[in-house]
Image (cartoon, rainbow, N blue to C red):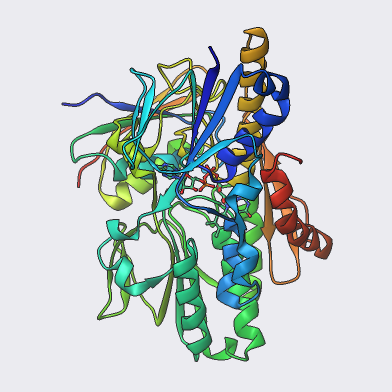
């Protein structure tokens, strides 16, 4: 399996963590994982909401010191 | 030995860097201690924000272009000879004509490009205004439009985050002006769960859309377009019919970046503060082609270019680092044919747009002309 891609979107106001994730998944192969680091608490709800709508897999959501890590696996 | 500074890409950021370096390194240039070379793709410099006005016939095409040689300081060695391969290990760039340029410092400024061909049916069925050919076709289609369903579809990633909202407000004004609004419907689609990436802009846009009757569909990422059935479908399972489809296609970086193995999708991994390519200390990356998670916009390109100029000048003259990039982005937002607002933010300051006004709209129109001064490095 290839290395997990990490997007450090902490402090990124525009286009923001979810948009970065969507863009990254377009370039990923099915089965690959992308980890998004976000300082926006909204990411903890909007990323899982979108992942569910599209049918990718939410691997983990972890609260770190002052930010969140959300890992998503491309499922299709 | 003269230090060679090589810039690949003669769009906004490459041009600002080249001109800014010439001005600040005049003595070194005169003494033959530095050489500045720029590789571009065309003898014409295109003012991209002007493309927004083309579909409505509100700008003459000649106003969009300037002679690149004239925009550039005459001390820049300018070649219309695109880079084919960038070899950061060997410190050299090979061009389309087969020439090889060695560098001491490299600035990658190759921008981003639209990729409608990556979505089935999009290139055949959709209109866009992100390049001149597309904007001309959209102008023809709009002038033949007699009313119906228009979908404005936004895809990630894309440059100029405000252009999708702007085109929607301008479309509304245009249809109203032609007396077609009563027979028309605009649906705006956006990749995430609100109308714009910037929350305050999204919060402002929603009631504006509601007021004028523009519909919207959020969490909509285009999966495919069916040109025969005239429908656009999303990864999220929604399908919308259209009579006219206007899209902001997904973008990628320049081909040469992928071909040189410098970054997936043409986005170069870049340190958000130093603007160094990750892993290099003599390769800088500016503008749309960085992978930094901030807006791909002219103002970003401009502020990054200023940082790179300061650091290169400081490195050449005093062998020291000058300053880091603070993530600053500034955008005008056209909120109709006669009003506008603006927004700015950086890595630590969140955005907070003010109320739209006619004055800001005029300021943006004035900026359309000031662009050439800023490309020359005078602003
Ligand atoms: C319709 C529209 C409206 C916009 N409105 C605004 C706005 O209102 N405000 C704002 O801030 N921004 C706006 N932008 C965005 C802005 O134009 C870009 O973000 C900006 O031009 C980025 O600068 P850049 O130097 O990174 O890339 P560019 O200006 O695109 O320049 C990249 C250059 O690299 C060249 N190149 C590519 N490959 C090679 C190669 N292999 N060798 C040599 N050269 C190469 C390209 O030909 C191009 O000339 C708008 C863009 C569009 C399309």
Q: Residue at x 60, y 48 (%)?
A: B69
Nearer-the-camera pick, B263 or A62 = B263
Of B3 and A64, nearer the camera is B3
Where residue B152 sits in the image (x, y, percent)?
47, 68
All told, the count of numbered labels is 0
Q: Is residue B137 left or right of B214 when viewed as pictured? A: left
Residue A73, percent from left and from top: 25, 36
Quarter-wise, where is residue B155 in the image?
bottom left
Farthest-out residue, right: B359
Question: Relative to B220, is B231 above or below?
Answer: below
Would you say B58 lies left or right of B291 here?
right
Q: Residue at x 25, y 48 (%)?
A: A55
Most extreme residue toward the front, as rendered? Answer: B31
Residue B102: % across, % down: 41, 23
In the image, farthest residue toward the top: B319
Tell me the residue at 77%/51% (across/down): B354
Residue B199 x/y as whole percent: 60, 47
Taking B110 as reference, is B237 left or right? left
Report the quarter where the C terminus of chain B lies: top right
Q: Is residue A25 above or below residue B217?
A: above
Q: Taking the image as drawn, is residue B33 in sight?
A: yes
Identify the image quadrant of residue B165. Answer: bottom right
Q: Does residue A40 show up?
A: no
Seen in the picture, residue B67 relative to B189 is either above or below; the reply is above
């Amino acid at each position: 399996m290839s290395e997990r891609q990490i997007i450090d979107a902490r402090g990124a106001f525009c286009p923001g963590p979810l948009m970065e994730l969507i863009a990254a998944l377009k370039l990923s192969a099915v089965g690959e994982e992308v980890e998004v680091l976000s300082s926006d608490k909204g990411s903890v709800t909007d990323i899982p909401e979108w992942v569910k709508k599209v049918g990718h897999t939410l691997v983990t959501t972890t609260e770190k010191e002052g930010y969140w890590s959300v890992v998503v696996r491309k499922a299709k | 030995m003269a230090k060679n500074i090589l810039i690949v890409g003669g769009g906004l950021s490459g041009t600002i860097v080249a001109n800014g370096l010439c001005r600040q390194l005049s003595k070194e240039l005169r003494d033959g201690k530095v050489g500045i070379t720029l590789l571009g793709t065309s003898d014409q410099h295109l003012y991209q924000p002007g493309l927004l006005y083309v579909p409505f016939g509100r700008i003459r095409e000649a106003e969009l272009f300037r002679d690149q040689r004239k925009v550039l300081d005459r001390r820049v060695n300018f070649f219309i000879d695109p880079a084919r391969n960038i070899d950061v290990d060997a410190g050299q760039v090979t061009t389309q004509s087969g020439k090889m340029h060695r560098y001491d410092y490299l600035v990658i400024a190759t921008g981003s490009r639209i990729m409608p061909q990556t979505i089935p049916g999009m290139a055949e069925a959709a209109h866009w205004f992100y390049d001149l050919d597309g904007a001309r076709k959209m102008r023809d289609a709009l002038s033949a439009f007699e009313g119906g369903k228009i979908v404005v579809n936004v895809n990630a990633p894309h440059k100029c985050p405000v252009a999708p909202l702007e085109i929607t407000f301008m479309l509304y004004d245009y249809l109203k002006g032609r007396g077609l609004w009563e027979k028309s419907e605009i649906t705006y689609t956006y990749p995430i769960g609100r109308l714009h990436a910037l929350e305050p802009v999204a919060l402002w846009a929603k009631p504006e859309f509601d007021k004028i009757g523009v519909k919207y569909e959020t969490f909509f990422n285009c999966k495919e377009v069916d040109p025969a059935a005239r429908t656009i479908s999303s990864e999220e399972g929604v399908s919308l019919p259209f009579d006219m489809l206007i899209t902001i296609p997904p973008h990628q970086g320049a081909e040469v970046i992928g071909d040189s193995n410098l970054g997936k999708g043409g986005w170069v991994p870049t340190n958000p503060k130093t603007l160094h390519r990750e892993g290099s200390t003599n390769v800088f990356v500016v503008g749309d082609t960085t992978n930094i998670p901030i807006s791909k916009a002219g103002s970003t390109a401009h502020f990054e270019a200023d940082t790179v100029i300061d650091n290169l000048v400081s490195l050449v003259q005093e062998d020291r680092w000058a300053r880091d990039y603070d993530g600053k982005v500034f955008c005008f937002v056209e909120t109709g044919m006669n009003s506008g607002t603006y927004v700015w933010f950086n890595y630590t300051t969140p955005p907070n747009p003010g109320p739209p006004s006619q004055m800001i709209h005029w300021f943006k129109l004035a900026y359309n002309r000031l662009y050439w001064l800023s490309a020359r490095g005078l602003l």
